[in-house]
Amino acid sequence: MITNDYELMTAPNSVPVKMWTHGVPVEAEAREQLLNTAKMPFIFRHLAVMPDVHLGKGSTIGSVIPTRGAIIPAAVGVDIGCGMMAVRTSLNAKDLPDNLYAIRHAIEIAVPHGRTANRSGQDKGAWQQPPETVDHHWSVLQTGFKQLTDKYPQLLKTNNHLHLGTLGTGNHFIELCLDESDRVWVMLHSGSRGVGNAIGNLFITLAQQDMKQHIAHLPDRNLAYFEEGSRHFADYMEAVGWAQNFARHNREVMMQHTLAALATVITKPFTATMEAVNCHHNYVQQEQHFGQNVLVTRKGAVAAHRGVMGIIPGSMGAKSFIVRGLGNKESFCSCSHGAGRVLSRTAAKKRFTIEDQKRATAHVECRKDSDVIDEIPMAYKDIEAVMAAQSSLVEIVHTLRQVVCVKG
């Protein structure tokens, strides 16, 4: 059933699923996964599905899951607090050098990125010696981390302090962009890094262990949940809140270092003004909807309350958007977090070549090697179609195009 705004999907013994997916593909496996989540007894009213929806672990990426009395750790995921940050500078396109490699190189030096696989020594994606900015931000997080590790000492063995202010791998990036008036923006995407991953996996495992007598009755074992009032529910909410705070600080440190790196290449003095919120898109928080206090899990979705600014990136060769929320109640005031994949990383690497990657990113100063083929623009949905499908959720304020992209 299709309304003016969304497709309505229903099934026996489940809440409705409202999908803002007009004009964009939705894989059959993702639809099945959505209906599995909709069968959980504590879902409030309905699921809201964003146009970038695709298959995830337990629950689809690109879904908004409102719950009462319970929380599903795998729905929040392991990249807790992953999100975006963008600032507009006082620079214009004409202030940039003709060759942008020096800017990319300066950012790559300033912000640890990537990962050293099978490392016996240091990880290139972590600080070897954290600078003062990292230590300062860590001092804000340290008390909360001690409270967590007093209860769960295994978290001490994670990358935490040394990952603060680092980028990571996969679809995480730092970009220099131009808007419709050729003004220069810096935009970046990352989350809670190694420590957030460890927290997510720890509590997903605990939820499955807590439900071991009942897990066979779940549609998917990754829908294991904590009931409100239980010890692990309270501990998880504390841990996930801390990880989300870490992610926010992580983006702030990276932005600070990226702007400093930009200033080493561009000698003209410039300022940077926050034009969009430092926004999560993998997180949970308590909100009020339809007159009720509910836990809203946005798994690959951004808050789009009326007037709230957000960021919706495309792929490394497509447009990105600074948006303003329209406060659509049916979507639980949410919008998409990006374009959404149409091909898995493995499938993209099998289908495309380095030459394909070079052609697709010809206008961007970025890596063009075999290790980033999985991020090729064609592995993602058409961002223009994604934006058209959610015109009732957000309005576009700025349209950005990348000129530099740093990936791990």
Image (spheres, grey):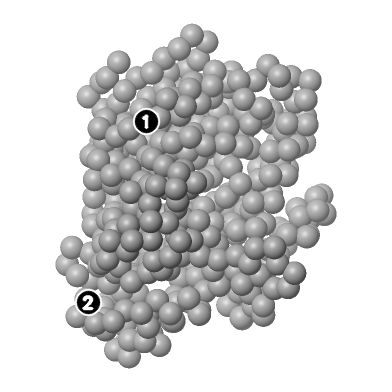
Question: Looking at numbered disc 2 in the image, what kind of residue is underneath it?
Answer: Asn
Residue 77: which disc? none
Question: Looking at numbered disc 1 in the image, what kind of residue is underneath it?
Answer: Val
Q: At 57% from the left edge and 40% from the top edge, which residue is drawn?
A: 76
Q: Tag 2: Cα neighbours inside 10 Å, few (<14), some, or many (≥20)?
A: some
Q: At 58% from the left edge and 77% from the top edge, which residue is drawn?
A: 133
Q: Which residue is mark 1?
A: 26
Rendered location of residue 57, percent (x, y): 57, 36
Label 2 SS: strand
Q: Which residue is mark 2?
A: 92
| Residue closest to the eye, 204 or 407 | 407
* Left or right: residue 115 compared with residue 154: left
Instruction: Measure the C-alpha gap from mark 2 to mark 1.
Output: 39 Å
| Residue closest to the eye, 406 or 361 | 361
Q: At 33% from the left edge and 61% from the top edge, which residue is drawn?
A: 355
> Which of the marked residues, 2 or 1, is nearer the chain's N terminus?
1
Q: Residue furthest top?
A: 12
135 vs 211: above or below: below
Rendered location of residue 281, percent (x, y): 47, 47
Q: Quadrant of the N terminus?
A: top left
Q: Residue 328's quadrant in the figure?
A: top left
Q: At 69% from the left edge and 31% from the top edge, which residue is drawn?
A: 226
Residue 217 visible, this angle: yes
Rendered location of residue 38, percent (x, y): 51, 21
